[in-house]
Amino acid sequence: MQAFAVTHDGAEVVMGKLAVGDALIGAFFTWLGFFVPVQLGRVAWEKAPWALFAINAGGHLVALALMSTVFAMM
């Protein structure tokens, strides 16, 4: 997540403060790439209902969003 806050100032690389918006974008794409496929696999192979997919995937998204917001504020 700190990769979003890196800037290039001439010949020097500067680490900046991570913005909350950038942290939330990182959390969303982490959720989309790692958590959603696992939950979709449960729907496809275990015949889990879509409501369970929504509950589980939504819970993971909220958890990632909260964690990334906390990390960004540190």
Image (cartoon, rainbow, N blue to C red):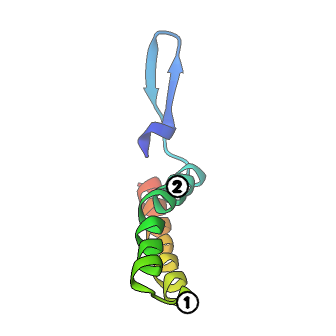
Q: Identify the residue position indicated by label 1 in the image.
A: 51
Residue 60 at least partly seen: no
User: Where in the figure is residue 8, as x and y percent of width and height?
Assistant: 51, 20
Q: Contact, CB < 8 Å: mark 2 with mark 1? A: no
Residue 61, percent from left and from top: 50, 71
Give above or below for 53 relative to 14. Answer: below
Q: Quadrant of residue 13?
A: top left
Q: Position of residue 51 (x, y in %)?
A: 55, 89
Q: Quadrant of the C terminus?
A: bottom left
Which secondary structure, mark 1? Answer: helix
Q: Looking at this view, is 67 or 30 the one in front? A: 30
The residue that disc 2 covers is: 29
Q: Earlier in the sequence, mark 2 or mark 1?
A: 2
Residue 33 vs 51, above or below: the answer is above
Dot 1 amino acid type: Ala
Answer whether residue 14 is visible to the viewer in this image.
Answer: yes
Residue 54 placement, left or right of 68? right
Q: Residues within 10 Å of mark 1 (few under 14, many from 20)?
A: few
Residue drawn at (45%, 65%) of the image: 37
* Residue in front for this viewpoint, 73 or 13: 13
Q: Is residue 55 above or below residue 2?
A: below
x, y percentage for residue 62? 50, 74
Q: Residue at x 51, y 60 (%)?
A: 32
Q: Residue at x 48, y 62 (%)?
A: 31
